[in-house]
Image (tube, helix red, strand yellow):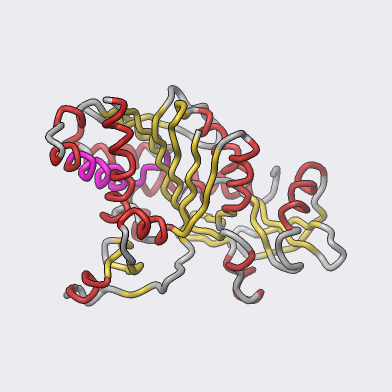
Amino acid sequence: MAGGLGERQGSANRRYYKAKGEAIYSDFITYAGSKKLAYCTAKEYYPHLEREGQGTVFEFGIGNGIFARKFLMQLREMCKASRKEGLFLKVRYVLHDVSPKMIEAAKGNLKEFGGIVEFRKFDAIEDDIEGNADYIRINELLSDLPAEVFVQNENGGAQKVKYGAGGTEIGREKAIGEEERVAKAVLSHFPAGYFVPINFCAGEFLLKASGALKIGGYIDIFDYGFANANDLLPLDMWNPSIVRGYGGQITVDLNFPYLSAMAKLGGFGASVELQREYVERVLGQNVHSIEKREGLEYYTGEEMKGSKDKRLESYGEDDAFYHLRVIK
């Protein structure tokens, strides 16, 4: 990845998150604060916690701590409803982030969980993971890790797309070596001419995180990307949107088929579904993806009818957020 998009992306995103901290939320909005997503992840984790009598949860790319806060609030309520308040105190929740500003913001938002949470400065590109976890949660981190974009030419060859500082295409070059081998395998599932990202660093990190799981543990990854060629938009819409910049940050769509294949090659179970479908499966009812001033959320049909919030806007049924479950 030397000198390519991946190197630029890694450097830019380190600077961005270290400098801005929680001010990033003025550049984009996420599902990090979704009460529905928190409820679903807590509901699935609670039986594991109850069975084991204790639990260790790792989170990577923590934002301002709201993703952890909403999850812990839901988990605490489930323990209370089962009259097992003491069980909640047996949870150890470790938050990892590269940005000291993010860590400080998260500490402020998680004060009430001081006896449960721990914080570690952590660079997902370079650092090794210390310890083991029953459950690992990753929300919109992997699309920020260094990736490269490839395109198949009419002759079936693989070319690497070169990008300028503004995230616009400035040329192409022949893929070589291991990159060429991987790119040809991935591109064979897509039409010629389409830009296809390969999230190399995300794949490496996923294997590292999977290796940190205890037997029977699992990972939930929530991020923006695509699951197969059926997700393709018209070429003139797809190619310019694969690499995007927000206030100095560079994000690249997450190639979920590639990550799933990497997990399986590592000997782990892996499955992909729309994030909305995950929420519907756990809740047992249909939901709509909506936008609120404070972030993205899921509402049931009844909640949509009863809402007085004039800022709600439907994203439609398929909003390109996906869920990847990896099991050890």
Compared with 99, 273 (above or below) is below
Residue shown at 41%/60% (left/top)?
277
Q: Picture quarter containing residue 160?
A: bottom right
Residue 255 visible (yes or no):
yes
Q: Is residue 73 magenta?
A: yes
Q: Which residues are magenta?
A: 60-76
Of helix, strand and loop, which mostly describes the magenta segment? helix
Residue sitting at 71 percent across and 54 percent down?
186
Q: Is residue 145 left or right of residue 21?
A: right
Please identify the quadrant where the N terminus is shown. Answer: top right
Q: Is residue 293 left or right of residue 134?
A: left
Q: Position of residue 18 (x, y in %)?
A: 42, 42
Residue 15, horizontal then vertical, whole percent: 48, 45
Residue at the farthest top position = 131
Q: Position of residue 317 (x, y in %)?
A: 42, 71
The residue under the point 38% across, 49% down is 20
* Residue placed most toward the observer, 35 or 238: 35
Q: Is 166 part of what is drawn in magenta?
A: no
The foreground one among 207 and 328 is 328
Please tell me whether residue 304 is drawn above or below residue 323 in the rendered image. Answer: below
Which of the 4 image quadrants contains residue 230?
bottom right
